[in-house]
Image (cartoon, coloured by chain):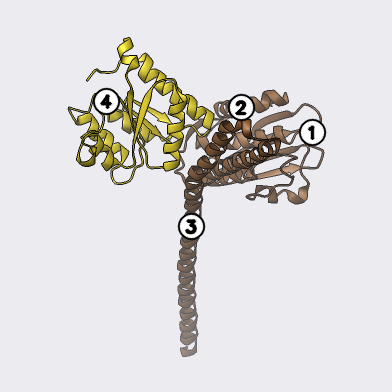
Chain colours: A brown, B yellow
Amino acid sequence: MAALGKARGRILAGMYQGIAELEGLETERKRLEEALRRSNQELEHFAYIASHDLQEPLRMVASYTQLLARRYKDKLDADADEFIYYIENGVSRMRALIDSLLVYSRVGTSALTLELTDCEAVLDCALTNLKVAVSESGAVITHAPLPTVMADALQLTQVFQNLIGNAIKFRGKGLPRIHIAAELGENEWLFSVRDNGIGIDPQYRDRIFEISQRLHSRTEYPGTGLGLAICKKAVERHGGRIWVESEPGKGATFYFTIPMTGDR
Amino acid sequence: MGSQARARLIEILLVEDNTGDIRLTREAFKDGKVLNKLSVVEDGAEAMAFLRREGKYTDAPRPDLILLDLNLPKKDGRQVLAEIKVDQNLKRIPVVILTTSKSEEDILKTYDLHANCYVTKPVDLEQFFTVVRSVQHFWFSVVKLPQE
């Protein structure tokens, strides 16, 4: 009888110890999560400050290079013109990079304004922003009916804009054909942007969403290498996922989800 | 505007702390067709001293137009604007906010403080020159300035 009592006591003690350990681990997990969240926030804040503060000195370089070119136009030889061209080219690339970094850090840190967002209006807005690229490429853009979702309209516009912009940029030989659709899933909307462009080798399909991971040289396809990273950050802030299905030479379809409930 | 006004030298006060921007603004104003003289102060406190003709500024000219940057040392541009627009002697002088900021908040706040207009400095040099020419044309050829 006493032995049973002792055994029960040991089991209970073991249980209590187990619970205490679990609680300890849980506290530790929460602490690490908080530390990670804070660290991410600091990094994104840093990116914002850096890209913001870099704009002014860049403006000085750009303005005075242009002023030099303007003022000494008649006294400059062909070499000088070429040197100035490279300076101006470097400046405009730097400006594009800083602008992208600003967008990226804002997508990461700014308050998410979740409201009922008409995705057809969002698509319209994105296409208006891409007007020049669309007309220059002759891209044919179609879409299925798109829903109204709870999302940050500005960020969602950015996602559509970047995905469609890429679809146009990485086009193949024929006329770019791009189709946008949405499908109702379980508690989420699944959006897709399909193109008939050059496609992506499956081994790179995760890497392309990382910052600065470009698969082509700058002369082949210009760009800052941040567009998809921005999409990923925006989608994930909404609690969604983003991925691509593609094969080289066979176009690409980018998918992303926007959850329906407040599961952020 | 009579021929008498056109022949007169236009006095402009530029309040700007970035020396690179000061030089650029000078170049842009030189480029224009209106005869003008640009006085420059580099912080908000100097700006008020200049306008009130205090200390070393006893002989300072009264500006026909003030170009005011927002982010200034010592006294912030918004503070300078507020002080100008409540000062009986100074509030008639048109104030053009010339700043790199595109922030909606800044625009609203400065108009609330009775800035005459708000101009965001373009990043491109040619555009900046065009903007300055527009400012000169609008404020000195199109608009009637108060005769003081």
Of callouts 1 and 3, which one flags the residue occurring earlier in the amino acid sequence?
Answer: 3
Same-chain check, marks 2 and 1: yes
The image's mark for residue A172 is: 1
Q: Please state which of the two labelled residues, at mark 1 or mark 4, is closer to the viewer.
A: 4
Q: Nearer the viewer, residue A120 or B34?
A: B34
Spatial separation of the CA atoms under disc 1 and disc 4? 60 Å
Same-chain check, marks 2 and 3: yes
Residue at numbered disc 3: A37
Residue at numbered disc 4: B93
| SS class, disc 2 | helix
Q: Name which residue type carries label 2.
A: Leu
Q: Name which residue type carries label 1.
A: Gly
The image's mark for residue A210 is: none
Query: Could you tell me residue A69's position as x and y percent?
Result: 59, 34
| SS class, disc 3 | helix
Same-chain check, marks 2 and 4: no
| SS class, disc 1 | loop
Spatial separation of the CA atoms under disc 2 and disc 3? 34 Å
Q: Verify CB contact (< 8 Å) between mark 1 and mark 4.
A: no
Q: Nearer the viewer, residue B14 or A257?
A: B14
Q: Please state which of the two labelled residues, at mark 2 or mark 4, is closer to the viewer.
A: 4
What chain does badge 4 belong to?
B
Of callouts 2 and 3, which one flags the residue occurring earlier in the amino acid sequence?
Answer: 3
Q: Please state which of the two labelled residues, at mark 2 or mark 3, is closer to the viewer.
A: 2
Spatial separation of the CA atoms under disc 2 and disc 4? 44 Å
Q: Name which residue type carries label 4.
A: Ile
Q: Name, please, the residue furthest toward the top.
A: B2
Q: Is residue A192 visible?
A: no
Residue at numbered disc 2: A127
What chain does badge 1 belong to?
A
Q: Residues within 10 Å of mark 3 (few under 14, many from 20)?
A: few
